[in-house]
Amino acid sequence: MVVVSTEQFTEIQNFIRAYDGDLNSCNVELESRFPELSAITLGSILSKVVLQRVKTTYSRLVAKVDSLVSQYQNAAQQTPDHDILLKMAAKLRIPSTVVCRIVLGKLYQNLPRSEVLDMLRVPDMIPDSLLAMNVSYCLYSEHMDGPLTDAIRRCIGEEYEDRMKKLARAAGMVFYDEGDLRRTGYDKTPDLKLAVPFLFRGQVINWIESKASFGDVDSHRRYVKDQLASYGNRFGPGVVIYWFGYVDSIADCAENGNEVIVTDGFPETEEIEFLTFNLPCSLVDTD
């Protein structure tokens, strides 16, 4: 079980927020300070805290874009180093690709936004060779944000969805996946919709949702509002799996109602009880 107490989660958050250094080093320090938690759980918590910081500070960073560009250009005139933008990001305590995105947007503001985003994905497209080298270094050093990180997260999400489907089949479940449901006209769909529900923790379970991340309060409430509540209203109670663990307070938060059960793994075989249906005698073939 990877269920983190509210007190420990707050301690981890405070450590990340107070950490003065690059984010990769922060990740290493977290593993040393909280050895009882897995690296993947701590990495997921770090990512969520950092991305929340970006959301709250992004507008202020954009407002001082001229200062950021000047800072980069002054440093670039003095040294051909490839880690100028990376060091700027470390001082700001944000992902380096965020700084790259802001600086590129200013320096190439006359280009279409799509072209500027392509420069972040493919730094060789940047006309300035030193800037291209700096952006490339950030792109391949960053673990919190950016095109490569997004691609990795998608792959991990798909990996855990596949794992869930294999476990469901092994448990004898019959289900429809997202593709099946969308072909029949549903817009918002859970990862698995059970053809035959089962009992779990006293609830009849009709769907299962996979989240390859850590479940914190803010993200869980957002998921309930944007996704899980609609599944509950349409199909009845279901399970959301946070594969990298969750903070204990979300298991019984008011937003769950009677429709959302939180777990950190696929239900164990002994926890599952399949529903049985008694057919009328007239429908039973007695020959």
Image (cartoon, rainbow, N blue to C red):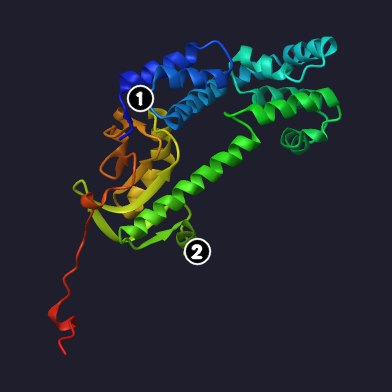
The x, y position of residue 87, in whole percent, is 67, 15
Label 2 belongs to which residue? Answer: 183
Name the foreground residue: 255 vs 2: 2
Residue lying furthest bottom:
287
Q: Quadrant of residue 228?
A: top left
Identity of the residue drawn at 37% across and 18% down? 10
Image quadrant holding the C terminus, namely bottom left
Q: Which residue is mark 1?
A: 36
- Using the image, determine if residue 77 lies above or below residue 237: above
Is residue 140 left or right of 167 when viewed as pictured?
Answer: right
Q: Position of residue 35 (x, y in %)?
A: 39, 22
| Residue 165 percent coordinates (x, y) | 41, 55
Q: Secondary structure at mark 1?
A: loop
Apparent side of residue 32 relative to residue 267 in the rendered image (left or right): right
Sequence-first disc among 2 and 1: 1
Instruction: Tell us which disc is closer to us: 2 or 1.
Output: 1
Foreground pick, 86 / 103? 86
- In the rendered image of this protein, does residue 60 appear above or below residue 164? above
Residue 77 image offset from top left, x and y in percent: 85, 12
Residue 128 shows which numbered tag?
A: none
Q: Is residue 29 above or below residue 215?
A: above
In three-dimensional space, the C-alpha distance between marks 2 and 1, rounded to whole angstroms, equals 44 Å
277 left or right, relative to 50: left
Image quarter (top left, top right, bottom left or bottom right) of the N terminus: top left
Label 2: how many residues lie within 10 Å, few (<14), some (14-19) or many (20+)?
A: few
Q: Within 10 angstroms of label 1, few (less than 14), some, or many (20 or more) residues?
A: few
Q: Is disc 2 placed on a helix, strand or loop?
A: helix
Callout 1 amino acid = Glu
